[in-house]
Amino acid sequence: MTLRIYAIAYMIFLYAPVLLLPVFAFNDSPVIAFPLKGFTWGWFNDLAGIGALHDAVKNSLWIACMSAIIATGLGICAARAATRFEFPAKRGIMGLIMIPLVLPEIIVAVSLLVVLVQILNLPLSNWTIIAAHVLICMPFSIAILNGAFSNLDNSLEEAALDLGESRFAAFRLVTLPLVMPGIISSLLISFTISLDEFIIAFFLSGSEPTMPVYIWGLLRFPQRLPAVMALGTILVILSIVLLVIAEYFRRRGLKRAGLKDTGGFL
Amino acid sequence: MTALISLTGINKYYGDYHALRDVDLEIAEGEFFSLLGPSGCGKTTLLRTIAGFEDVTDGVVLIDGADMAGVAANLRPTNMVFQSYAIFPHLTVAQNVGFGLRKSGMSRSDKAQAVQDALEMVGLGGFGARAAHALSGGQRQRVALARALILKPKVLLLDEPLSALDKKLREQMQTELRRLQRQVGITFILVTHDQEEALIMSDRVAVMFEGRIAQLADPQTLYRRPLTRQVGDFIGVMNFLPAQFKPVGDLITADIAGLGQAELASEQCPAGPVTGGGAVGIRPEILSILFQGETTSQRETVGQVIERAYYGDMTYYDVRLDDVDAPVTISMKNLIDRPVLERDDRARVSWDPRALVGFSD
Amino acid sequence: MAFGRYKNSEAARGLTLVSPPFFYAITLLAAPLAAVIMFSFWTQDFLTLDRTPTLENYRTIMTEPLYGTLLLRSLYIASAVMAVTVALAFPIAYFVSFHVPAHRKSLWLFLITIPFWTSYLIRVFLWKVILGYNGVLNSSLLGTGLIGEPLTFILYNPNAVVLTLAHAFAPFAILPIFVSLEKIDRSLLEAARDLGESRAQTFFSITLPLAMPGILAAMVIVLIPTIGDYVTPRLVGGPNGLMIANLIQTLFLKLNNAPLGAALAIVAMISVATWCITFIVIAKILMWLTNKARGLT
């Protein structure tokens, strides 16, 4: 019973910031503090008027899409190789690919900055951010896809071969439909990570800021804060929608494979 | 006998591990053939070699006269029932069964008819629309059979298809598989570690140990005249008693510990005539206990009951024959007027020398 | 060699498949990390980069007290974050694993991960709003009359950094612990009870030792990334809550002294890795000692 009360208190702690967002987003006061003043849609209207924000959002969406697609593509290769085949130095290779999961993001940012700017003398652009985001999304993608691939019975593909299909057709007809929910889930998670990532993007963004980098700039202007709250509210809702879809596909994948659900992402 | 499948000099390595050693094998058309052996003996590897899922390191695989070297699994005239059944979980039962017909060029209605026929053949008439992951173990097994047989392969390969089923269902499926095989007339190759299953179902059985075929014979020969002690021990129960052999003309005389002198005909030494030290093997049902007042025209010896196990229809006794250290197992049918002996009872044991098998090791 | 063929086909297919992500990681992770190490031995004077290898940067870090102070503070804060996060997370993981019915577990895990995926920057900023002088916490406490004047020790100091990061890394700590708890065969606990252990004894003699791998994983997975965060210290840490990553960021982006920044990043990584290995070894020794004391080894 004490444990249940603790669990509820902990969930309040976890959700406190998220729940406060809409409170201030609809609060009719330029100051982010209690007591509340009244209800307004005004801060959302303000958002519509900031052109620079729109550019930043477009930028971020493009970066998130590309990062998600590339990370998931590479993730499929790695996850399938890791679950289906034995090969030399497997642990070392997979370890290297998974390292960004525990590497401080600033190290990824610094190392890419050094190579790109100081050594190769390349200009920073959206592609430099995408390159880094793929690196940090890939381990998450692999973790999700590993689940999807390792649930597969190897003899399923063999059965398709045995029934006369080619290796590629066997993959397309049997493996792909069964891991598709995992792929969609991986795309959505990678998209969410990239869309939200700040630490690396701040180092690697060129002349066009991403949305988090733009928000970071806004945080210095107190009069902009209510609009940031409004933007945050929209982002939270968007993330939750994406995550619910991702979770739905993950579960459907398990159900399709006739398996029991054993836990969430990660 | 025309050989449908012919394996010559098959060798297979996994790294340093020698999985198949000089396997030669011919399997006839329409035969129900079993590969029997303990786990790790290479029987599944041999099956997957025929299916095309494993390359051979050395040797030739012929199916219907055609060399299978370099022929991928999807192009071979074989189909397989997998140990896990490998039912595609995202498809319906009918889609599973019809999977192999995708490239057949049949019309939609012909395909539907073929699927329907195949399902009825395995007793799953009304199950076509069911989701595959909602099936029971026995039903999955039937779907796997229908899916493989619908392509009318020259050979059906079955990889431990009954091992996941419970005892009752397994026994029922054994009879049904046999019936199905007779009905379709296709060559079946069954991999199993269950010696009873192999004896019940097969026309011929290859017993494998450590990558080698130890004996290839029909079930009766396999049971009555095992080539080696290892085979005799693996198939059913066999008692071994140390013996000294000496050839006398066509016969071999054996001086057997606990039993005394006996003469063995040449076919009682299936691996060839034995001389010097060795062992004789004798099945539990060949030995029998003589109860009060019973006499026998056969040979007789004495011993002491050290353990007994009552099975209802049978009683199994462990009897230590006088002058022998290791006990022998004797099985007795429980008849209405036949008593059951207790531990430490003395027992008179009769035996038939014609059923002995001589081994050199 | 004939048997090589099998090995090759299996290994070759695996290697072919893994090579795109592997080369990606080599080019964009391993090679850049190597470049950072090389870079740290160079020096920068305003716009000119001097490529003569020298230990100058490391010497600066050793001698200037600022770096040592920040490094120690960062390790201290990161360790506090680790301890607080794992201590707060363990009961939750335990609750979900042992008290939530099986069909609800994934819902709970999902709810736990949701806040983690929502805008990181804004989340950190909101802690500033919650903990501030006129913040949510102070206003509510003042409103209920629990305190006479606003609390000031909760914002712009290391406490705030610890709290905010404990929030940010919650799922990273909960999930590994949950996984290790889920792996515990429940009949082990019943066996311990059956052999006469009390509920509490069972927890300490069976559950906790078996959950240890998960707890250690949680500690590492929280400790290491914490060192690299510069947003939280900047927003809620105040002048005494700044961490080594803030300095690295400043060196790279404001002071234009990338070589010194690279050296500092390397020193930070080595320190945190050393600290990590140290406490894992300590934990292993402690576990071994407790087992020995129980006479189990």
Image: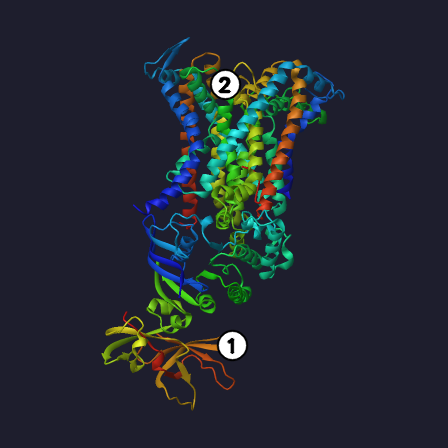
| Quarter where residue A7 is shown | top right
Mark 1: amino acid: Gly
**Chain of the residue under the numbered disc 1 shown in the image:** B
Which image quadrant is residue C16 in?
top left
Using the numbered discs, state the Cα–Cα distance from disc 1 to disc 2 in whole angstroms. Answer: 82 Å
Q: Residue furthest bottom?
A: B293
> What quarter of the picture does the N terminus of chain A occupy?
top right
Along the line of sight, the residue nearer the viewer: C47 or B15? B15
Residue matched to label 1 = B312
Label 1 close to label 2 by CB (< 8 Å): no
Query: Is C97 displayed left or right of B198 in the figure?
Result: right
Where is mark 2, residue-wise? A203
Instruction: Give A226 or A213, whichever is nearer the viewer.
Output: A213
**Count of numbered marks:** 2
A172 or C259: nearer the eye? A172
Q: Secondary structure at mark 2?
A: helix
User: What type is the residue that disc 2 sits on?
Assistant: Phe
Which percent across, then down, holds residue C278? 40, 33
Q: Is residue B149 above or below residue A82?
A: below
Q: Are marks 1 and 2 on the same chain?
A: no
Residue drawn at point x = 45 percent, y = 43 percent:
A84
Res C84 seen here = yes
Look at the picture and state if A24 lies above or below B260. above
- Give how far across and how far down residue B228 sits, in percent: 32, 68
